[in-house]
Image (tube, rainbow, N blue to C red):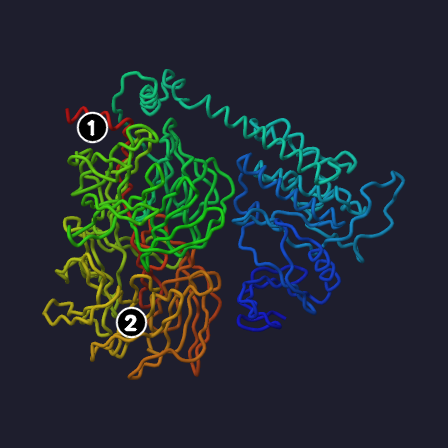
């Protein structure tokens, strides 16, 4: 019988189902005694003996890379909850980088070695049972484990004991050894064959044996040899190729005879591969020198000229354009860090996409092509490790890293939202998050997170002792750059800026160089001493008409330590666009304004109120667009007005107003007839809904170290009252059309989920009764259909999802169904931002979409020389 969320199994509270199979169902649960998250596998009655076998097997093991057994019940196992991903995902089977594959393979072999030493076979080794976590590999699911027989067998042995009672094969067909198909008893070498199949797939991106059906697959395993790894990856070491093929020998006697020997061989190969890669890197620091004379194009020639700068020859600035591949566009993420140069600027990491989801692409500056990194789908922010070996990115509520040459992404930590990040030499990452605005310092090794005050656009200086960042500063009526000493916390105010700030040294690793920043639409450079954290002289212009959002410090440019500069001059305009329930583009609403991210349809569905960015003042105002005439008129004249919400009769709007200070709640008539009403100022007040009876305005309340809370404002009394205050983030409340139920997102499970609870709007409004979870695998931004029969929300991977609603004496919800994924060009401030709205009949969705691809990226190599030449 399936267990429902909230039910108990002994002292364990069931949170959610996370998997199922022939042996039972696995649930995520909470141990109420120790307050920890665990995984519970509940047995199907017919498999109780296998469950007992698994319990005995796992209980006998204590190894870093094997899942730990915590407890056992009458028909369930309580195990370590592992937050990881399968070592190979069948939805995106791509090759791993060889060093990464070897590192993982050594850990798997080590786990097998420990199990075999205890006399325990796995017998179901496959990618789904090998998870990658922040701490490395975790081997799980010993449901088919057994005590091992001797590793040798007489040639005269015949099959006498069936492996099943009724001819059933135990294991997963794609990863079974020949002897298991033939009915022979498995031994340690059977696990080694399965290990070889997994490693083959990790290295090549394809399975060793492929067939149209199960019978043909079994025949192929019994009689065919897979193509050598080197035939698919010519650069593969012959030693590694031989090691894999030895795992896959038909005859067990010709395979590796123990996991220990296999582990030692892989470790030896890994050491030699590392040396080989290091040697190749030293020999090919400037590979474009060889290609420049062969006419590879402007990029190669420019990079050849750039290379002369390190050899004592003449230096000059060189410019060229860099365009994404045909059909692919840079997914400019508004306030997100969507492009980043590697520490030495031969590679550009960027968020880009075509018709499919955005992902991380890497463009070598000595090449005319870019390469996507599978496994990064949905990424919205990108940055580099200081050695250039890894690319960090944010996706789906997690901060992740991936080898720069491609491979398997690894989770660093859970993180609700990330706008920008920087990675230090001592393997700490500082991330600027939003809603609520914060900064966090993260240990790459442990994933430990420490929160501190908001620092926008953090950037470590070369020594790692100072951090550059940008924050609002009332004394300059905008943004100012700062440098903070990490050990003491001592801050130094630098210059006014409209954008993020980067530092380029005169020589790699040096302390003297230039700060680059944007001001008044011009990219500028200012001399800077990084050791003393002090500026020198006056800013000098580099490029004009660089787009930026002055109130948020966003612009598209980056620099590298060896003198590369890249920036965009393309337009970032976005248009509000209708999509149908399949995601089909029905056309834009209006093309004359750049919508900021907050907008709402009027109660009659005929108008939309939106905040529009003003480049001249670096802030937003509220405008209203008449959808029937495609006309747009400004409603507020106060810089910093944002997040409009309509009154139930459509005559007024509520909004947050703040310029260089937290937004505070206000209302005003939409016909601009006067009569503005202000509410008491406080923390960051972001209105999200207005009750149908006109009594309450719901708003998100954040500020300082506080989490996002849901508050209500009494329209008549202008009084502010808390509605939902918890240690967790709760945001974006939406009241049902009948005013009885509040939908909201909260992250108390570790990720945003959508909940619904009854709202009681008396003199002291409150939420009463049980809280029902509507989303199953993450969600935010709830929206009701006008008649209350459907509830919509955004999944973590940006899919618009619908839930059927039945209301009577109570309220009941159907199963969530994904309608469509928002397009790559969709733009939103953060995952918690409700960057969409729904027509009254629930058949159309309004989203902001960029129409123009914009100009190519501008690349300038040895840009400091150009600066010196232009300034005498």
Q: x, y (%) of residue 170?
A: 73, 53
Cα distance between the residues tagged 1 and 2: 52 Å
Quadrant including the C terminus: top left
Q: x, y (%) of residue 259?
A: 70, 40
Is 115 above or below relative to 634? above
Observer-nearest of 321 and 448 = 448
Quadrant including the N terminus: bottom right
- Relative to 630, 365 lies left or right: right
Q: Any mark on residue 698, and which?
A: 2
Residue that mark 1 sits on:
867
Is 355 above or below relative to 578? above
Q: x, y (%) of residue 848?
A: 29, 54
Observer-nearest of 96 and 460 = 460
**Residue 701 quadrant:** bottom left
Question: Counting residues from the N terminus, which is met first, the one under dot 1 or under dot 2?
Answer: 2
What kind of element bears circle 2? strand
Q: Which residue ends up furthest to the left in the rendered image?
A: 673
Is 157 above or below relative to 787? above
What kind of element bears circle 1? helix
- Relative to 576, 430 lies left or right: right
């Amino acid at each position: 019988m399936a267990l429902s969320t909230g039910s108990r199994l002994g002292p364990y509270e069931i949170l959610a189902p996370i998997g199922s199979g022939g042996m039972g169902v696995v649930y995520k649960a909470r141990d109420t005694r120790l307050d920890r998250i665990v995984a519970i596998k509940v047995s199907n009655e017919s498999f109780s003996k296998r469950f007992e076998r698994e319990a005995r097997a796992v209980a006998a093991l204590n190894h870093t890379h094997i899942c730990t057994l915590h407890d056992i019940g009458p028909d369930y196992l309580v195990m370590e909850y592992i937050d990881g991903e399968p070592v190979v995902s069948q939805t995106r089977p791509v090759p791993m980088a060889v060093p990464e594959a070897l590192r993982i393979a050594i850990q798997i072999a080590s786990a097998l070695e420990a199990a075999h030493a205890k006399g325990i076979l796995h017998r179901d080794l496959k990618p789904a049972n090998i998870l990658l976590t922040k701490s490395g590999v975790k081997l799980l699911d010993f449901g088919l484990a057994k005590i091992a027989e001797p590793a040798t067998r007489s040639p005269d042995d015949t099959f006498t004991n069936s492996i099943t009672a009724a001819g059933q094969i135990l294991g997963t067909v794609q990863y079974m050894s020949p002897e298991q198909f033939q009915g022979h008893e498995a031994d340690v070498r059977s696990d080694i064959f399965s290990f070889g199949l997994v490693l083959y797939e990790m290295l090549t991106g394809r399975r060793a044996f492929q067939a149209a059906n199960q019978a043909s697959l079994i025949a192929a395993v019994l009689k065919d040899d897979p193509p050598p790894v080197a035939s698919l990856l010519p650069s593969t070491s012959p030693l590694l190729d031989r090691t894999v093929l030895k795992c896959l020998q038909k005859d067990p006697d010709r395979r590796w005879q123990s996991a220990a020997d296999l582990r030692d061989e892989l470790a030896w190969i890994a050491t030699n591969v590392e040396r080989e890669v290091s040697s190749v890197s030293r020999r090919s620091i400037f590979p474009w020198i060889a290609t420049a004379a062969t006419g590879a194009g402007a990029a190669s020639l420019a990079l050849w000229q750039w290379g002369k700068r390190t050899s004592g020859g003449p230096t000059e600035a060189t410019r060229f354009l860099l365009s994404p591949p045909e059909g692919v566009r840079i997914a400019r993420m508004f306030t997100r860090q969507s492009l980043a140069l590697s520490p030495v600027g031969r590679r550009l990491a960027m968020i880009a996409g075509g018709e499919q989801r955005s992902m991380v692409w890497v463009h070598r500056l000595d090449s005319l092509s870019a390469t996507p990194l599978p496994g990064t789908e949905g990424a919205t922010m990108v940055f580099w490790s200081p050695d250039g070996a890894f690319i960090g990115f944010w996706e789906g509520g997690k901060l992740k890293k991936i080898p720069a040459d491609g491979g398997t992404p690894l989770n660093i930590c859970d993180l609700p939202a990330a706008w920008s990040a920087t990675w230090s030499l001592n393997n700490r990452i500082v991330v600027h998050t939003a809603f609520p605005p914060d900064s966090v310092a993260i240990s790459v090794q442990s994933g430990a997170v420490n929160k501190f005050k908001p620092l926008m656009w953090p950037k470590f200086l070369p020594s790692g002792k100072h951090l550059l960042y940008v924050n609002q500063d009332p004394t300059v009526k905008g943004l100012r750059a700062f440098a903070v000493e990490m050990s003491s916390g001592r801050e130094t105010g630098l210059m006014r800026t409209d954008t993020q700030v980067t530092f380029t040294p005169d020589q790699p690793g040096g302390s003297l160089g230039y700060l680059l920043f944007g001001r008044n639409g011009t990219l500028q450079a200012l001399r800077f001493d990084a050791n003393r954290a002090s500026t020198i002289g006056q800013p000098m212009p580099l490029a004009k008409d660089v787009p930026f959002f002055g109130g948020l410090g966003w612009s598209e440019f980056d620099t590298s330590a060896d003198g590369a500069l890249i920036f965009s001059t393309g337009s970032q305009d976005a248009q509000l666009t209708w999509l149908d329930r399949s995601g089909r583009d029905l056309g834009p609403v209006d093309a004359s304004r750049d919508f900021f991210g907050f907008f709402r349809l009027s109660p009659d569905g005929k108008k939309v109120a939106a905040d529009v960015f003003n480049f001249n003042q670096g802030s937003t105002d509220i405008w209203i667009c008449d959808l029937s005439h495609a006309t747009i008129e400004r409603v507020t004249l106060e810089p910093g007005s944002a997040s409009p919400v309509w009154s139930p009769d459509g005559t007024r709007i509520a909004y947050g107003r703040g310029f260089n200070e937290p937004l505070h709640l206000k209302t005003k008539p939409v016909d601009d007839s006067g009569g503005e009403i202000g509410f008491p100022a406080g923390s960051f007040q972001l209105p999200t809904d207005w009750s149908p009876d006109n009594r309450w305005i719901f708003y998100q309340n954040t500020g300082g170290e506080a989490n996002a809370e849901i508050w209500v404002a009494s329209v008549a009394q202008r009084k502010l009252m808390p509605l939902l205050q918890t240690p967790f983030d709760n945001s974006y409340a939406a009241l049902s059309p009948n005013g009885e139920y509040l939908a909201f997102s909260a992250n108390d499970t570790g990720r945003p989920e959508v909940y619904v609870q009854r709202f009681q709007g008396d003199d002291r409004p409150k939420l009463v009764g049980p809280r029902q979870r509507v989303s199953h695998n993450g969600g935010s931004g709830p929206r009701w259909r006008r008649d209350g029969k459907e509830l919509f929300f955004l999944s973590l991977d940006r899919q618009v999802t619908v839930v059927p609603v039945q209301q009577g004496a109570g309220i009941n919800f159907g199963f969530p169904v994904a309608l469509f994924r928002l397009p790559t060009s969709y733009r939103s401030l953060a995952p918690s931002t409700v960057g969409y709205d729904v027509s009254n009949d629930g058949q159309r969705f309004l989203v902001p979409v960029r129409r123009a691809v914009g100009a190519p990226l501008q690349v300038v190599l040895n840009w400091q020389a150009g600066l010196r030449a232009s300034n005498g």
